[in-house]
Image (spheres, grey):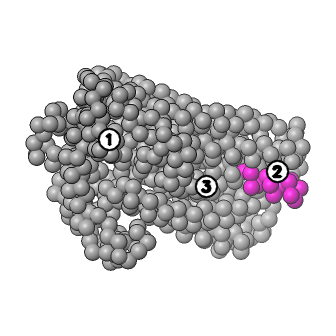
Amino acid sequence: MEPTQLVVDLSRWQFAITVLYHFLFVPLTIGLAVLIAAIETVYVVTGREIFRDMAKFWGKLFLINFALGVATGLTMEFQFGTNWSFYSYFVGDVFGAPLAIEGLMAFFLESTFVGLMFFGWDRLSRGKHLFVTYMVALGSNLSALWILIANGFMQAPSGARLDPFTMRLQLSSFANLIFNPDAQTKFVHTTAASYVLAAVFVCAVSAWYLLRKRHVELARRSFRMAAIFGLFASLAVITLGDASGFKDVGVQPPKIAAMEAMWHTEKAPAGLNLIAFPSSREQKNLWSLSVPWIGGMMLTHAFDKPIPGVFELEAQARRRIYNGIPALLALERLQKTPGDNRALTTFRQHEKDIGYAFLLQRYAPNVAKATPAQVERAARKTIPSVPVVFWAFHLMVYFGFTMLAFFVLATMFSLMRSEYRRRWFLRLSLWLLVLPYLTVELGWITAEMGRQPWTVYGILPTWLSASTHSVAYMIFSLAGFIGLYTVFIVIEIYLMRRAIIEGPATAPGKDDNTQALPTFVLKGGSA
């Protein structure tokens, strides 16, 4: 029994919503952990109490966010077994390994040390507490590493091979799974984006204190460190994003074609669409504004390498579908007669394209009698939604460069010690807080929507991966998750807001509300 299209769509919506909710917490946890470690390092080196207060205050906000991140993340892995049962069966031997290691190595490491970091300030020496803080930062980044190794396998399968007798992917090279270039590139890109989000968060909260002339010394130092941290992180995100695009040209060309709204293969070097209004129905851009040559040079790092367009990729998909049909027919014979050596030989000759035959089954249950129209329909489905992927990617890029510009100004103003005079910029820092959250969500949408119609790219199509639940069950569970995760978001905002309003704890007589500001600023002046 196969899942209906509506059940597949609802399963996708449920997983997408829970991931996007969860990803509101994850980047701040990763980024704040590293930034707190940097702040505490300055405290240990200099011995200045202000940096201790900074580390404790941002550590309190980290702990709130970490707890809510754990709460939203625990339920996600269960969905693989409940809503994606065939996927779990098909890829579990490979996909389960990095998830298990993430739990044993990263999550437990982070969870063990986070309590010591929060409660150990008066119980551990400076050096020991700093070690604990570094372990928390290491754990949060290792967690991201193993999750993205698992996701990298879905984006660019490596280190596994289909066993035709068990119908499961078997791990053939653990080293290839771990050192998958796609996974490593996306790890450094994602963690750098997390550092940007944490830096914007710290700048925004610090700006709020400066606007209200509270905890001024702590806020100014936090603003300065976050601005410099964010500037380098933004440059890393842009550089690593370019590396990720360069990898995807060879690994997932349909994603690149959708990201650039490129319907026809252009003469190298291809242009770059700055703005476009693509139509998947008409398979063309209704309007576009492009810059010549830039796209090809950015994506291929060469002047003579073309970027394949949608129509060429559909033609390639048609050839792969026809080549995969003998593999699927041989697989069916092997299921009935495991000793059929001719079938095994045929399967091995065509197995690299069997995923395309699986995709064809959605439109032609008997692939041996598939019509050209059915093959054409399957081939067109190998291209993800061009409007969604194009705008998700381009908005992510535009927002990324906006934050780079912000950090350039923030670093310059803070090093000039003039940020408190520019109240317009402090207000901008508050409004900008939403931007990195939108950016990381758009990045995730680009990666996941750009992989469709596959759960494991080129091997296992999404329609085949879902469980055979009823529509009523999926609607009920989807509504339940949305309600539960919304409650988590409300709790996060309430606890964060309360902690920020209370402000950092300072020793008696050490309130720095009016430190470091000139008299004319304290009286309300501005420049």
Q: Examine the rendered structure and indicate whether residue 89 appears above or below residue 277.
A: above
Residue position marked by numbered label 2 in the rendering? 52
Q: Residues within 10 Å of mark 1 (few under 14, many from 20)?
A: some
Residue position marked by numbered label 3 in the rendering? 195
Q: Which residues are magenta?
A: 36-52
The residue mark sitting in front, 1 or 3, is 1
Dot 2 or dot 3: first in sequence order is 2
Q: Amino acid at mark 2?
A: Arg
Q: What residue sits 78% from the left and 42% below the top?
A: 132
Dot 1 or dot 3: first in sequence order is 3
**Viewer-proximal residue among 340 and 477:** 340
Q: Is residue 47 magenta?
A: yes
Dot 2 or dot 1: first in sequence order is 2
User: Are the two marked residues, 1 and 3, in contact with CB atoms closer than 8 angstroms?
Assistant: no
> Where, by quadrant of the figure, is residue 371 drawn?
top left
Q: Identify the element where label 2 is drawn.
A: helix
Residue 248's spot in the image, x, y percent? 41, 58
